[in-house]
Image (cartoon, rainbow, N blue to C red):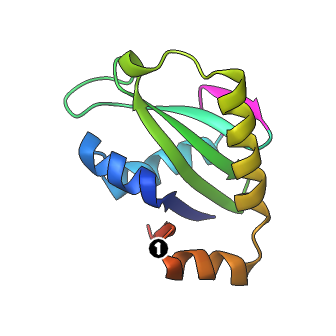
Amino acid sequence: MRIFKTKVFARDSINAGITDTELVNAAAEVDRGEYEADLGGGVFKKRLARSGGGKSGGYRVILFFRKDERLFFGRIFAKSNLEDIEDDELKWFKGVSREYLEYTDDQLNARIKEGWIKEIVP
C-alpha cells in the first residue's frame, strides 16, 4: 500500500508533532481495520495520540483510503477544536477522496511533482 499526505496535512502534522513513522504505523492500523469511523466514500476517521499522551485526548485524522492500494492523510485536528464533522464538510471530503483514490499513476506522480501530495516511504 502506498501512503501519502497532502500539503496541508504535512504542515499541520509538523505543527502537531506527528512524525512520518507515526503516520506509517497509523496507516498499518487502518489497513488492519483499526480506525474509529468509516464515514463512507473512502473517508475514514482515525485517532492519533498526542506526544506524551493517549489517543482519547489527542488528534483526529481524516484520511482517504482504499484497502491494499492507497491511503492519503487529508486533515488533522485536535479533538478540542472540532467534535463533529458537518454534513457539507463530509460531502467535500468524499469528493476529495473520490478524486485522490481514482488518480492514475501519471496523475498521482504529477501531483507529487507539483508539491500537492507527498509520498511517505516506510
Query: Can residue 60 be found in the magenta stretch?
Result: no
Give the answer, above or below, for where 58 lies relative to 28: above
Residue underneath mark 1: 115
Residue range (magenta): 33-40
Q: Judge left or right: residue 95 versus residue 75.
A: right
Number of marks in the rendered image:
1
Q: Residues within 10 Å of mark 1 (few under 14, many from 20)?
A: few
Give amino acid for label 1: Gly
Residue furthest to the front: 88
Residue 88 visible in the shown view:
yes
Query: Residue 33 occupies which quadrant of the picture?
Result: top right
Q: Is residue 68 left or right of residue 11?
A: right
Q: Quadrant location of the C terminus? A: bottom left
Q: Is residue 39 magenta?
A: yes
Q: Position of residue 19 (x, y in %)?
A: 30, 52
- Where is 6 relative to 63, above or below? below
Residue in view at x 70 percent, y 51 percent: 96
User: In the visual, does 32 lie left or right of 16?
Assistant: right
Residue 102: x and y, percent? 79, 64
Q: Nearer the viewer, residue 76 or 56?
A: 76
Q: Extreme left residue here?
A: 52
Q: Residue at x 70, y 40 (%)?
A: 92
